[in-house]
Amino acid sequence: MIRILLFEDNKNLRESLSLYLAGTDGLWLSGAYANATDAVKLVRKYQPDVVLMDIQMPGISGIEAMRAIKKVNSEVKVLIQTVFENDDKVFAAICAGANGYIIKTPKPENYVQAITDVYNGGSHLSPSIAAKVLAMFQSQFVMKEQTYVSLTPREKEVLQCMVKGMSYKMIADACNISFSTVHSHIKNIYEKLHVNSAPEAVVKALEMRLV
């Protein structure tokens, strides 16, 4: 059972998403809130596995709330949701420790997939966000000198899929391997790149020109 806390200031979206998540097998919605002012206190109280956080919140922003949450519990997975694809916000969220970044959608099943991805140790970068991250690094943030990291051909293939924002299931299908094998490869990638999340792995892969 994946325990979830939802922070969303849009009442209609918060209520509709709450109903869907609460009624989905394998998920447990601990609470849904219109602002993130008490996010740290609520995380301590409910001990969620995944926090679904709107980036644009009243009081304190979703990024500020995420930073505070990560300080008290680094194990909590934080999935940022937004209608914005602003470059600065994307990088601010990734650098602050976001485990995933999803563009708001009327399809609630997309949220379930994203939540499952980050809970299983992966990430969910909406395709448009993944493309934006890649373009930004290629244009201005890529290091001039390549740093050598010993990745196997299969690990590089999996890493390329991660850069494209693919889920564990999509990677398994694309590489014709099992879900558990994908998990094993990603664990090895994290260790070799010295990172703890898929967004960090994507950033480092692009920075080091590994893909």
Image (cartoon, grey):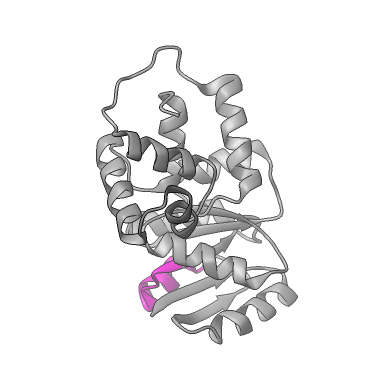
**Horizontal and vertical percent for residue 64?**
52, 52
Residue at horizontal 30%, vertical 43%?
A: 190
**Is residue 18 placed above or below 168 in the rendered structure?**
below
For the residue pair 126 and 38, the one nearer the viewer reads as 126
Q: Residue furthest bottom?
A: 23
Q: Is residue 92 magenta?
A: no
Q: Residue furthest front?
A: 176
Q: Which residues are magenta?
A: 38-50
For the residue pair 110 and 77, the one nearer the viewer reads as 110
Residue at horizontal 33%, vertical 19%?
A: 147
Secondary structure mostly seen in the magenta stretch: helix
Left or right side of 65 for 73: left
**Is residue 17 placed above or below 72 in the rendered structure?**
below
Residue at horizontal 74%, vertical 76%?
A: 12
Quarter of the image for the N terminus: give it: bottom left
**Horizontal and vertical percent for residue 119?**
40, 64
**Horizontal and vertical percent for residue 54?**
61, 60
Quarter of the image for the C terminus: give it: top left
**Is residue 139 placed above or below 151 in the rendered structure?**
above
Q: Is residue 40 magenta?
A: yes
**Horizontal and vertical percent for residue 127?**
62, 47
Left or right side of 11 for 176: left
